[in-house]
Image: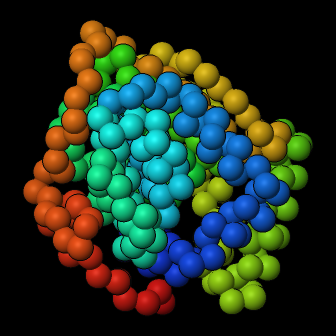
Amino acid sequence: MGWLDMERIADLFDSIAPGYARWSEILSVGGINAWHHAAVRALEIEAGQAILDVGCGPGWVTRQIAARVGPGGHVVGLDPSPSMLRLAAREPSAHVQWVRGRGEHLPFADRTFDGVTAQFSLRNMGSWRDGIKEMVRVTRPGGKVVVLDLVQPVSTRGMMAARALGIGTWALAESGWPGYRWLARSVKRAPTVEEVETLLAAQGVSLVIQHRWLGDLVLLVAAERLGRASGGGRVASARGSQVSDGMMLARGEELRPHGPME
């Protein structure tokens, strides 16, 4: 299926995991940490809640969330890349689970979480539309759904920022990090602002917050699932999951490296 095949996406993120933190900071011109903090604030986390971080990568955001829910809460970091999950699990926490899985097929029951976020992971899914639907499905009424990602820019500034990002990632790819060829391509298949908002509204959520950075290249959308709010509680285990080496693995998958990219 080419570069969009999900096993190849997992391979790709395995390959860039060692330098991911450093190059994310450089490519975003120092903005990525502020954007992540804004997204975490948009979740309006309370102590004791259950929160899901979809596409958690090395776990920076997951740990921020865990600090906010406290020991009485529960946080799940989900990612398809075993290497990213290994990096994330280097700092163990009693109320964080690391789950191998895909955002468009979340291995959790309906209305499991008080808040769900996907930060720079939506456009890497096989279907970003299915990813949003799944995020809403597993969110309790009254809970927050927060998306932070690159989207297709329409403004001059946004298109200039996307062009600069493409140049930077190509240079990285040519200097020994071939997995970064993915990033510029991923923007071309990313949703627009309007597409994200329209689909969220169709899933029964109300828009709460919207921010844009780098013109309109980076989007933060926070929405609240409508319906009768339910009480908080600990997250239910992933369906068909098992625990191995401190990580919960979705649907019984083994934690092992995939084959090399072609």
Q: Position of residue 261 (x, y in %)?
A: 47, 86
Q: Residue, x 47% and y 50% (percent of image)?
A: 63
Residue 241 visible within the image: yes
Q: Residue, x 14% and y 59% (percent of image)?
A: 241
Q: Position of residue 64 (x, y in %)?
A: 51, 45
> Which residue is situated farthest in the left direction here?
240
Q: Residue, x 17% and y 65% (percent of image)?
A: 243
Residue closest to the eye, 136 or 87: 87
Residue closest to the eye, 241 or 7: 241
Q: Position of residue 99 (x, y in %)?
A: 29, 59
> Which residue is situated farthest in the front direction here?
71
- Is residue 7 depicted above or below 220 in this figure? below
The quarter holding residue 187 reads bottom right
The quarter holding residue 36 reads top right
> Which residue is situated farthest in the top direction here?
228
- Is residue 37 depicted above or below 182 in this figure? above
Q: Is residue 149 left or right of residue 75?
A: right
- Is residue 6 depicted above or below 178 in this figure? above
